[in-house]
């Protein structure tokens, strides 16, 4: 059952990722992106990363997507005002580049090169992750707070009326 | 039990789709969404590796990636708004003010 659900979520995530890239209207791109995020949250749950699944929905599908939709609707561009894709030559060259890159990554066959799994159970619950974040990773966590403060200040300054 | 090798392949494909969108699209906002797709692919890979190694560190790493992605989205969208104010569109081919 878990395996079946994993394939369903993966297929949905990949299909909606393709839709994000191919839709001309940015609003439909954004809504398909929400779909991808939800499917990834589902995969996290299947992998027992419960806390990350919650954060994925709250931060990505919630905060970041609201920001995206807000900007799209504030700029209020009509889809035909903006050419969606690069011109033909660049488009095919870029597509070939992306496919070669992905193909070589797949060809590398990462899973074969990994050290053998020690085996055992892992549960990414809030308590276990919290102990790591507030223990071993306390300094990076505090630095993240500083980074977010910097981002707030930068965003306010960038979006002011006169730059 | 999730097939972890399949999860690695899904993450790589997701990253490839993100790369494709980043290179092919002209709308700055959609290019930004492609970057988010790539970040999500990396997160999926981190969670998969954490699962393989039975070590929670990978999930903490993914958590930090999400925090950085939130900061990056805020700053990036502010830049897009600033570019729009200056040029009245967000076509990446037309954003060439630094060239002259």
Image (cartoon, rainbow, N blue to C red):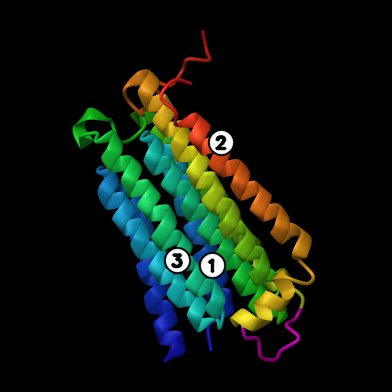
The residue that appears at 42% across and 48% down in the rendered structure is B33
Q: Chain of mark 1?
A: B
Residue A35, picture quadrant = bottom left
**Which circle's residue, 3 or 2, is located before the other in the chain?**
3
What's the CA distance linking mark 1 and mark 3? 26 Å
Q: Which residue appears at 29% of the width and 34% of the height?
A: A75
Q: From the viewer's perspective, tell me whether residue A65 is left or right of residue A111.
A: left
- Do marks 1 and 3 share a chain? no
Estimate the x, y position of residue A117 in percent, counting from the top left.
73, 82
Q: Judge depth for marks 1 and 2 and give the one in front.
A: 2
Give the camera-side residue of A120 and B56: B56
Q: Nearer the viewer, mark 3 or mark 2?
A: 2
The residue indicated by pointer 3 is: A58
Cα distance, mark 1 to mark 2?
37 Å
Identify the secondary structure beneath mark 2: helix
Q: Nearer the viewer, residue A152 or A44?
A: A152
Magenta stretch bounds: A116-123
Q: Which mark is residue B9?
A: 1
Q: Pointers 1 and 2 in contact (CB under 8 A)?
A: no
**For residue A28, above or below residue A75:** below
Residue A146 pos. (x, y %): 67, 49
Mark 2 neighbour density, 10 Å: few (under 14) some (14–19) many (20 or more): some
**Marks 3 and 2: same chain?**
yes
Query: Contact, CB < 8 Å: mark 3 with mark 2?
Result: no
Q: Is residue B67 on the magenta stretch?
A: no
Q: Are marks 1 and 2 on the same chain?
A: no
Picture quarter with the N terminus of chain A? bottom left
| Label of residue A154 in the image | 2
The residue at the point 40 percent across, 83 percent down is: A5
Q: Residue at x 37, y 33 (%)?
A: B26
The image shows residue A162 at horizontal and vertical percentages of 44, 20
Secondary element at image label 1:
helix
């Amino acid at each position: 059952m878990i395996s079946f659900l994993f394939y369903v979520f993966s297929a949905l995530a990949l299909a909606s990722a393709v839709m994000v890239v191919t839709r001309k209207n940015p609003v439909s791109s954004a809504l398909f992106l929400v779909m991808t995020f939800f499917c990834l949250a589902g995969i996290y749950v299947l992998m027992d990363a419960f806390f990350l699944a919650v954060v994925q929905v709250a931060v990505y599908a919630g905060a970041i997507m609201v920001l995206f939709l807000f900007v799209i609707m504030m700029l209020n561009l009509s889809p035909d005002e903006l050419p969606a894709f690069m011109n033909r030559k660049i488009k095919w060259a870029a597509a070939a580049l992306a496919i070669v890159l992905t193909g070589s990554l797949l060809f590398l066959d990462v899973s074969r090169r990994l050290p053998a799994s020690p085996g055992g159970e892992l549960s990414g619950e809030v308590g276990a992750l919290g102990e790591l974040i507030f223990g071993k990773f306390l300094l990076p966590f505090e630095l993240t707070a500083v980074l977010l403060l910097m981002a707030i200040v930068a965003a306010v300054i960038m979006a002011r009326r006169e730059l | 039990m999730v097939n972890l090798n399949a999860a690695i392949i899904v993450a790589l494909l997701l990253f490839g789709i993100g790369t494709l969108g980043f290179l092919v699209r002209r709308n700055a906002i959609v290019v930004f969404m492609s970057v988010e797709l790539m970040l999500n692919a990396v997160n999926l890979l981190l969670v998969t590796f954490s699962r393989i190694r039975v070590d929670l560190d990978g999930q903490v790493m993914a958590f930090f990636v999400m925090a950085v992605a939130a900061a990056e989205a805020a700053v990036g969208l502010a830049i897009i708004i600033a570019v729009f104010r200056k040029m009245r569109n967000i076509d990446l081919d037309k954003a060439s003010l630094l060239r002259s």
